[in-house]
Amino acid sequence: MDVLLQHLINGLVLGGTYALLGIGLTLIFGLMNVVNFAHGEFYTLGAYTAFAALALAGVGFFTALGTAIVVGAALGGLCERVLLRPLRGESIDTTMLVMIGVWIAMQNAELLGWGGVAKTIPHPFPTAPLTLGPLSVAPLRVFVFVTALALIAAAHLLIQRTRLGRAMRATFQDRDTAALMGVRIGRIHTATFAFGSALAAAAGALLGPVFLVYPSMGDLASLKAFSVVILGGLGNLAGATLGGLVLGVAEELGAGYVSSGYRDAVGFVIIILVLLFRPSGLFARAERIG
Amino acid sequence: MIVLARTALAVALVTAPLWLASSYHVHVLIMAGIFVILASSLNVLLGYTGLLSLGHAAFFGIGAYTSALLALKLEWSFWLALPAAAALAGTAGWAIGRLALKLRGAYFVLVTISFAGVIALVSTNWMELTNGPLGLPGIPAPALGPWSLRTKTAYYYLVLAAAAVAYLVCARLVRSRIGRAFLALRENEPLAESVGVDSTHYLVLATVVSAAMAGVAGSLYAHYTRFVSPEVFLFSYTVTMVIMVVAGGKGTLAGPVVGAVLFTILPEALREATSWQWQMLVYGVLLVLLVFFLPRGIVPGLQRLAPRRTP
């Protein structure tokens, strides 16, 4: 029982960041109809930005986290503006190929820039775990989980309460009508991509200190984000949040009770099973944002 | 004119080992031949039915492992292991094809990626069967009667023959009733179904053919390098195939061949000048540029440039 609880806690901590990744991807996927295979690269970008800010520029841990988010948003916006906006109206396959190109280019640029050796991000939290009876969790992981939840809450507020969020929801529901009502679709797309990329970068900067930072870390992150999106249903923010937590817990349980070698297979299996048996996602009512 | 060019090309291909400077060049041509088969197999799906498989390395890897394991553990001859590799890869393709029943576009891509991911993890973790990350060394070279196809020159002819057969299979397939059904489904699936094209039947068929061809390429690769490891499942193989097809011209017969030869020789030629990472970086940028500036690929681009000839 204690072991099970411990797995659940570890799973929830991981799941919080998976949810961040998933929310970004589900927004981009749902709103822009772009299959963003480069999503994981923005996660990697966030981790490396945090590393560079900490180790090279010497700023504090929290500033580094903020820097990663800003850089992620800026590069995401740029990517949308330069590569995706000219292709608006092209088929989903066309933009997918472009994003695969971006993925490969970004990953290998990172490999060239940083080398293949994994980096560790230092953090100011004590390494002694917090214990509660038989359960223990590192303070860093608590911080990661709480920050992830705060960012998720902020994302929900942005979508539900702000003018930009309303325009995003309108664009998702009916792009043409939204455009007729004066929503500038191009800007909404840029904002959405920047926002999604910022969340991915935040996830990278948060998980960077927990694990290691290396150029191909984004591949798995992308796949996890896709699993989360498919679990939660396209464009479903609450679904992505729940999906992230479910995936995190499922992975921990899979690694704990089946085999740790197959930890990363959990996401793949989820994708295949959900798409086969419940393609609209586990928590879907209808395809809509919010 | 065209007949002359074709004859010249055929003569050049058949005599290539005689006038090439070194066995290294023959090696590059062998790899090009294997990639011609792979790119053509991906083209059956991506070019003719419009389904993008990003798990194609899985079929290649299944073929390579099947052939390697049969040859090593059961001591099957290459000539039996090759069809078995094609059959098993084709069966995997059939399973994936059944999924195409329900899924299109991005969802199909995700299922193929996930499938390849699971297979790659199995190959790494199932130590008893696959020897895990260490791989399987010592795969025997094929023998033809008393002759062992151990030399590069001999293997070159084997791969050349296989690539020619793969090309002809594709050519026959896409010019047949089946190929027209593929195109109809690619262009407008509801319309095709309304005139009686059974989409399930044809899409499954396309995946099986495509996967089996990739399996053949895997078998040829395993018996050539005589070593397989989970690296055959590397995503960069799939990416390379996609770039070959897209750059060469998807939905054309010559496109994947041109793409495969170009993108096998080009990196080898650039190897002195650049590292693998630069090469992949260039691939990524190239893919983006192709989508923007040459969306239909090299072969259709050239066809548009060339003056129209009367057949």
Image (tube, coloured by chain):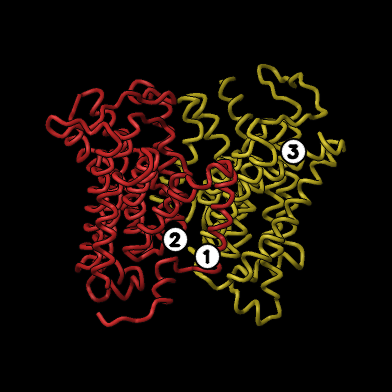
Chain colours: A yellow, B red
Marked residue chain, label 1:
B
Check chain identity for marks 2 and 3: say if they share one. no
Q: Quadrant of the N terminus of chain B?
A: bottom left
Instruction: Assign a secondary structure to mark 3.
Output: helix
Q: Left of B120 or right of it: where is A85? A: right
**Residue drawn at (34%, 81%) of the image:** B308
Is any part of residue B98 visible from this angle?
no
On screen, residue B171 above or below B1 = above
Instruction: Please tell me the numbered disc located at residue B64.
Output: none
Residue assigned mark 2:
B246
Q: Mark 3: which amino acid? A: Val
**Residue drawn at (20%, 24%) of the image:** B74
Q: Mark 2: which amino acid? A: Val
Mark 2 and mark 3: span between their CA atoms?
44 Å
Residue assigned mark 1:
B291
Instruction: Assign a secondary structure to mark 1.
Output: helix
Residue mark closest to the camera, 1 vs 3: 1
